[in-house]
Amino acid sequence: MIDQHRVPLVLIGGLPAHGTRHLADRFADEPNTAVVYHDLRDVADGVVHRTVRVHGTADTAIVRLDHGCVSCTLRHDLLPLLRRLARTAGVDRLVCHLDRALEPDRVCWELHRTPVDGETVLSDVEIAGVVTVLDPGTWLADATGDDLLAERGWHGAGDDGRTVAQVALSQVEFADVLVLAGHAPDPWTAARTGAVCARVAPSAPLLDLPGLTGDALLLTLAEAPRTGRRGAPVDPHGALVRGEPPLDADCGVELTTFSAQRPFHPGRLYDALDVLLDGVVRTRGRLWVASRPDSALWLESAGGGLGLAVLGPWLDAPDSPDWDEVTDERSALASLRWHPVWGDRAQELVVVSHLADPRDIREALSGALLTDAELAEGREAWAAYPDPFAHHGEHPVTTTGKDNA
C-alpha cells in the first residue's frame, strides 16, 4: 500500500540500454509523471549528463562533480533532485531510469540512509518497486562471464573493477518485477535463462516489454508478492533465500544450499573456491573461518568473479553489537541456529549452478571444514593456521578469478 502523503517512486534498471529507455519512455508519456535519467558515460571525468522529463518537456543539463564516481552522483545530485520533484505541484509519480552501471540496491541504500537537509528523501518519496529489464538473448552469457564493465565502456568510475556478471545478477535479484526486452536465440537459452531467474529472483513476475504500459507495470508491482524487497536494503546477516525458488533441477540449473556449524580451514577453503568459479552462476553467503573466529565473512561470486568481505563480529564475539542494535531478521536467525559452544557462528551458502554438479560443490566445501581432530585442537591452534584471506583486512573486495580472493 502506497503512502498517500508520499510520491511513489519506480526504479528502472538493467543492462540493455534500449530496453530500459523504451520502458522509461512509456512512463514519460503518462500524465503527472517525472522521469529522471543520469547518463554516466563521462562520470570518470567528473561529468554527468542529466535529463528530467515532466509535463511533456525534457530538461537536459551537465552536472559537474568534484569526484567522478557513482556515489557522488547519487548523493549530490539524484537525491536532492528527487526531493525537489516530489515537492513539485502536478508531479504524482517519479521514475528513476538508472544507467546500466548502477545497481538498484545501492541506489535504494542511499535513499534509506543518506540525509538531504537533515532527513532522508523517503520522507517525501515511497519506493513503489524496482524493475529490471533484461535481454533474454544475452543476459545468461553476461551473468556467467568474467568481462569487466570497463572492458565494455560501462564502468561507473575510473577505478570501477566490477564485472558485468556482478551487475547483471545484482540487478535481477533485487528486482520486484523483471521485464524481458528482446528474444532468446533458441528455446534452450530461453529455458535456461528462465530457470536461473526463477532461482535468483523467485518472487519477481516476468513481463514482456512489447505492449507493456506504465499503468500495467504499476498494477503488477502493487500485486507482486510480499516477499519482494520493494527497495528495502539487503541485510547480509539475514535470510539468503527469499520467496520460494524451485528446489529441483531445470535445464541443468539448480539451487544448492550448504550449511555447517564448524569452521572452515582457511587453506582448504581457499583451494575449494575453484568449485564456485566453474559452472556456477551465483554464490552468496556467510563464512566462519577458523583463523579468524570472531569475524563473519561474506562470500559472493558472479560468473567468473568472486568477492570476499568482512561483515564484522558474530553476535557471540567479544566485540559484538548488542542484540537490540541489529535487525530483527538477524537476531531471529541467530536465535534459531544458536549453538551452546559456537553461538551464531555457522557456514551458510546458497549456490545457483548451471553446469557444475551440486554433489561436487557440497563435497569440496565439506572437505574444507575442520576435521574432528582439528576441531579438538582449539582456537589457539586455529589462530596459527596460514590464512590466505588475511590481506582482505576489514574492507569489501571484489575480484575477477579466485587467485585474487
Image (cartoon, grey):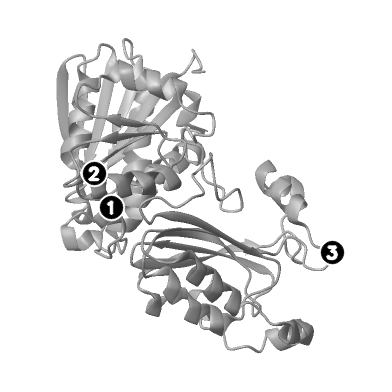
Residue closest to the eye, 199 or 10: 199
> Does residue 294 appear in this view?
yes
Q: Amino acid at mark 1?
A: Leu
> With 342 as the anchor, is 312 left or right in this view?
left
Mark closest to the chain's N terminus, 3 or 1: 1
Kind of element beneath mark 1: helix
Q: Are marks 3 and 2 in contact (CB under 8 Å)?
A: no
Task: Please tell me in which quadrant of the rendered image residue 100 appears.
Answer: top left
User: How many numbered discs, if any?
Assistant: 3
How far across and how far down the image is residue 301, in percent? 42, 63
Q: Is residue 366 above or below residue 194?
A: below
The dot on residue 340 is: 3
Kind of element beneath mark 3: loop
Q: Amino acid at mark 2?
A: Pro
- What is the C-alpha distance between the residues marked 3 and 2? 48 Å
How far across and how far down the image is residue 302, in percent? 38, 60
Residue at image location 40% in from the left, 38% down from the top: 175
Between disc 3 and disc 2, the foreground one is 2
Kind of element beneath mark 2: loop
Q: Residues within 10 Å of mark 3 (few under 14, many from 20)?
A: few
Q: Amino acid at mark 3?
A: Pro
How far across and how far down the image is residue 311, in percent? 58, 61
The residue under label 2 is 136
Residue closest to the eye, 243 or 2: 243
The dot on residue 140 is: 1
- What is the C-alpha distance between the residues marked 3 and 1? 43 Å
Residue at image location 82% in from the left, 68% down from the top: 341
Residue at image location 44% in from the left, 20% down from the top: 222
Between disc 3 and disc 1, the foreground one is 1
Task: Please tell me in which quadrant of the rendered image residue 221 appears.
Answer: top left
Q: Are marks 2 and 1 in contact (CB under 8 Å)?
A: yes
> Does residue 398 appear in this view?
no
